[in-house]
Amino acid sequence: MASSPLLSRVRAPEFPAGMDWLNTSGPLSLSRLRGKIVLLDFWTFCCINCMHVLPDLAYLEEKYPDSLTVIGVHSAKFSNEGETGQIRKAIERYAIRHPVINDREFEVWNAYGAHAWPTFALVDPEGYLVGMASGEGKRAVLDQAIDSLVTHHRSKGTLFPSILPPPPAQDKPTLLRFPGKLDIAENTVLVSDSGNHRLLLLEWDEKNPQTATLKAFIGKGQPGSADGSFEDAQFRDPQGIRFCPGDPGTAIVADTGNHLLRRVDFRKQTVTTIAGTGVQGWAIFEPVPALSAILNSPWDIVFHGDGMLYVAMAGPHQIVRLDPLGKEILPVAGSAREDLVDGSGDQASLAQPSGLTSDGKRIYFADSETSSIRLLLPGDTPRQSRIETLVGKGLFDFGNRDGPFHEARLQHPLAVLWDEDLLLVADTYNHRIRALDPKNREVLSLTEGHGLDEPSDIKKGKTVYLITNTNVHGIAYLLSTPEGPVLGNVDILT
């Protein structure tokens, strides 16, 4: 922590009145929480680093159930994230059990002097701020500081253990829960059922796009990393998913929460790990054996070139690739500095790449934290690769605007699809699908935000598109008609 938990005597700023509270029966105050240790987590739900610290918070809450209260202070980066309803969905998606305050005007953020997501502030049982820390990897220092506070205030008689009432019950289970990505092969659709920690295999005929039939569940539906049969295998928040080219009997999955790449064999009905150790790493700058590679939130994948599998690594802001034999992970692009900087692959900076597509020569990617669509010309080495930005200006430049590339603005896009000389984009936080025309360098909205809620992926059959309609736990279809695009919902028959 930034200061000693036993020496500092700075009174912690109280929460302002009139703010929206979630995951609790009513507003909380530090004065009401006297006698307990309070840990504030300043976060925003787009941020991969904020996602990474959630297991640390859960660990501390479990270790100190009656002495520690964690409060999430949601200080939104994007305008979509400032809406209380959207925060509520993010709380449900990430299974957050502690109270959360919507700090949409950054009042609490400014009062505490936070400067990065995530930032932690620790308050002792007497209401004094005793330390702050920013970034990932703070479990040990927070644990040590909390343990010291417990010992000190227990002996002093100022620790009064108690447990807050449980948060409201979560919504009833749904067949799909916050689906992330999908892929299509002929009449078969594979969906990352991210919130249920499994995959769904569907039969779908685009002549009747309104319905699909459930063929199989892949995975137990409980978070874990076990390989094995479809019934025994486990995933954790799976995202990117692709049928293998020329072999729809197998598929590759970016098992994001486990920091793994997995192979699904539909003939043997098995799941096997092909890359990663299950431990979160950082950046990759040298070739490394695939099963020894320490990956960091692989979010999407695409096959390109001679069997190479390219991986968008959201955690370290990189793109890497798995060689055709599956033996090595090789770096492609990304300096590991979060920013929007074009140039050679080793010098370019990315910002949470989350969607990949290929036209056969180039790879296009949705760089979500810069609200940009960028292209990659892959080379044999990062120095020989090139990055160029098509739409987007920087980490804090976003909006909802069509027009020429240099004027158009997106908001945290998570997917991009190459389709007959156009790029279709799931403009996630604007709740719409957009078309980018690289030849004329223009952006046009195909849907106007009605019926979609944070769409995370778009793929095409022969003529019909499927979209993961993430926040409504469903799949939508999009088709062209003489009157214009038609958007509808896919009903999954079980």
Image (cartoon, rainbow, N blue to C red):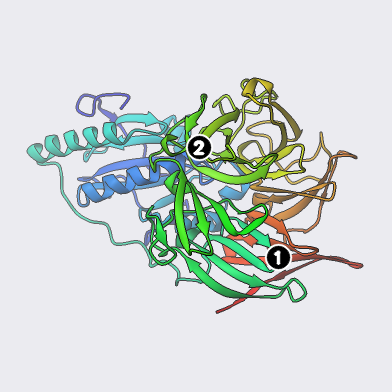
Amino acid type, residue under disc 2 in the picture: Lys
The quadrant of the image that shows the C terminus is bottom right
Residue named by callout 2: 327
Q: Place residue 468 in its image quadrant.
A: bottom right
Q: Secondary structure at mark 1?
A: loop
Amino acid carrying mark 1 in the image: Glu
**Of 477 and 105, the residue lying toward us:** 477
Between 349 and 303, which is closer to the camera in this rendering?
Answer: 303
**Residue 52 pos. (x, y %):** 42, 41
Q: Please name the residue shown 54% across and 42% down the image.
A: 105
Along the horizontal axis of the image, is 304 left or right of 201?
A: right
Pointer 1: residues within 10 angstroms few (<14), some, or many (20+)? few
Q: How many marks?
A: 2
Q: Is residue 81 left or right of residue 343?
A: left
Q: Which is nearer the eye, 17 or 271?
A: 271
- Residue at 84 percent across and 50 percent down: it is 420
- Most foreground residue, 139 or 328: 328
Q: Secondary structure at mark 2?
A: loop
Percent x, y of residue 85: 54, 58
For disc 1, the marked residue is 186
**Between marks 2 and 1, how big is the CA–CA gap?**
29 Å
